Every structure is written in C-alpha cells, then in structure tokens.
Amino acid sequence: MTVLAPSSTSSAPTHLSRDALRDLLLNKKFSALEEYYGGLHRAFSEQQFSEKELHRAYAVAESYRPEFTKPFRAWVNAYPQSYPARVSLASHLFAHGLKLRTMRLAKDIPEENRQELAEMMAEAWSYFVEAVELDTQATLAYCGLIHLQMQQGEQGWDEYLAGVKAAPQSMHLRQTMLNNLRTEWGGSHEAQEAFVKRPEHESLPEKERSRLEARRLRQLGHYLSHFAGDQAGAKKAFRQSLALSREAHALTGLANWAGPFAKRRLLNEALALEPEDDHIRTLHAIGRLETFAFAGPQLKILRDCAEWGEPFATDILGAPMWVIRLRPILLRFIHR
C-alpha cells in the first residue's frame, strides 16, 4: 500500500492547486503524486486537517478532462498498489460517465451516449472496489461505490455500513448515503428522516448532527423545487436548512426562488463558501446572466467549468442566451 504510515513528527503538506496537480499528472510525475497524496493521508490520519479538505485534494480526479485518462491509467500501472492512483482513476471514469449522462432525466440521456456511459460506470466500479482493499478507511472509494449505486437507482447500504465501520466519524460517508436516499433516485422522504436518526450518528458532535439534518432539508427543498413544483415548500425547506447550517448548496437552492437582488446576494455567499466547487461556480455564473450581468465574463467561467467536466455548465452552454436570461421565468412557468 502506497499511503504512508502515521508519523508523530510529520507536518501536513501544503495543498496543491488543481492546476498544479494537473501539471504533475500530464507530465507523468507519478512519484511526486504518490509523495503528495501519501503525505496528505498521513496528515489526515493524525487529524491535522479535515475529511472535507482531504476530499478536495482529489478534485483533479473528480473533474473529467479527456486528456487525463491515459495519465491516470499510466499512474495505476506504475503503482499498482496505490490507493490514491486507483481511487483517482475510478473517480475520473465516474466523472466521465456523469458528463455522458448529462444533468437530464434518465429517459432524456442522449441515446448515442448510453453504451459508453455503461462502460465507464462499470469500469469505475471495478477500480473503486480494488481501491477499498488498499486503505484502512477508503472513504472516498466507499462513497464512489454509493454514488454508482445511486446512478442505477439502487441503495448502497452494504458499502455505507462497511465504510462507516472502518471510519466511524466520517461525515462524507453519511452525507453520501443520505444523498443516495433522495426521493427522486428511488428513496423517500421517510427513508431520509429515518437515516438522520440512526444510532451511529449519536457519537457525532451536535454541530455535525445539525449539518446532517440541514442536508436532509436541503434535499427536500431540491425535490420540491425540481420534481414537485412546490415553491412555498421548497423555500421553507431551504430556509430551515440554512437555519441549522449555512451551506452553499442550500443557498443556491433558495436563490432559484429569490428576486434578482436577493439572488445575487445568496449566490455571492454560496461562492464565498465554496469558491472551488465547479457546480457552485456554474450556478453563480448562470445567476449573474439571469440578472442581466455582462455575458462575456460569465460565459468564460461557464466554459472553464465545462472544460473541467461540470455537466450543468456543458448543458447550459448549448442553450441560446435569451433562454439563459429568462430561465427563472421559464422555470416558474414549467412548475405551475
């Protein structure tokens, strides 16, 4: 296993930017990647930074760019027992699958994408399964398996239970499983309510339990917004979520139903909380276009997000500008 063992005298490595990691990958500096990720995992095991920060360090793998495929495969071949290499390749393949899937309903996935989509998801599954055997916690790999189950309309209980047994305090696992139970993916509101009350959460700090309930309410708001057309219920759920924990995705959800000035304020706050999240960056740019900001800077951001594999940015760039500008009005009309 390439992930390094804990050392009481070690210090946390400096986090590299996504662009810096891209350059290491494209230049096939695999030993540098191994050293970097090994140091991160060692520092994480010594609680020198959060699980969320560790997750962010893999952002280069979770963003699909076609030029990354061969280098990721070469990294796995060069270091066959490396957890970072395998989980990165699996995440990259899954991100490729999501881009092929698009942000549309399953019935609207482009027919020409379906075969390749199935192949990418199957290969991602195999690499996530192999990665689980290479790290004592492997939360990223377990979460990847749960995400894949969700894409099939299935629930990842086995992966969640195995993961939380290995990493009892993992919020990333809990949030991923709660996401898997979303009503629009074959779960239910009742299943989500039951999940946040499960006994394994009792050991969490109160702040983390509140974050879990806030996420459940955010998911309820998303469902009411996009699938039930319940504007009043959606706004109530998003506000209840934000009262418990100020999270970026709840802010963007509430922004969908806000007037132009409130929308800008909410989206600005969301971007300040998650400046590196391509989905948030995309929503912020779209929100600016919807409130009639100059198109040039926002389209530049959308193109950058699309180049990093963000499906919504890819979809929205294919729409005429007048559709983007009038999107809030069109959404309200559709959901009536």
Image: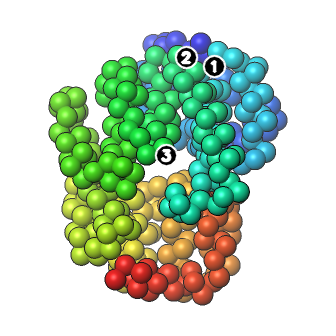
Q: Earlier in the sequence, mark 3 or mark 1?
A: 1
Q: Which residue is mark 1?
A: 82
The reply, left or right, for residue 250 in relation to residue 7 is left
Type of amino acid under label 1: Ser
Asked which quadrant contains residue 124, the reply is top right
Q: Which mark is first along the chain, 3 or 2?
A: 2
Q: Amino acid at mark 3?
A: Gln
Residue 114: % across, % down = 65, 51
Q: Is residue 138 left or right of residue 196?
A: right
The quarter of the rendered structure image containing the N terminus is top right
Q: Which mark is residue 319?
A: none
Across and down, in percent, residue 279 comes to 52, 59
In this view of the protein, which residue sits in the foreground, 212 or 109? 109
Is disc 2 in contact with disc 1, using a CB cutoff of under 8 Å? yes
Whether the residues at callouts 2 and 3 have beta carbons within 8 Å, the answer is no
> Which label is found at residue 134?
2
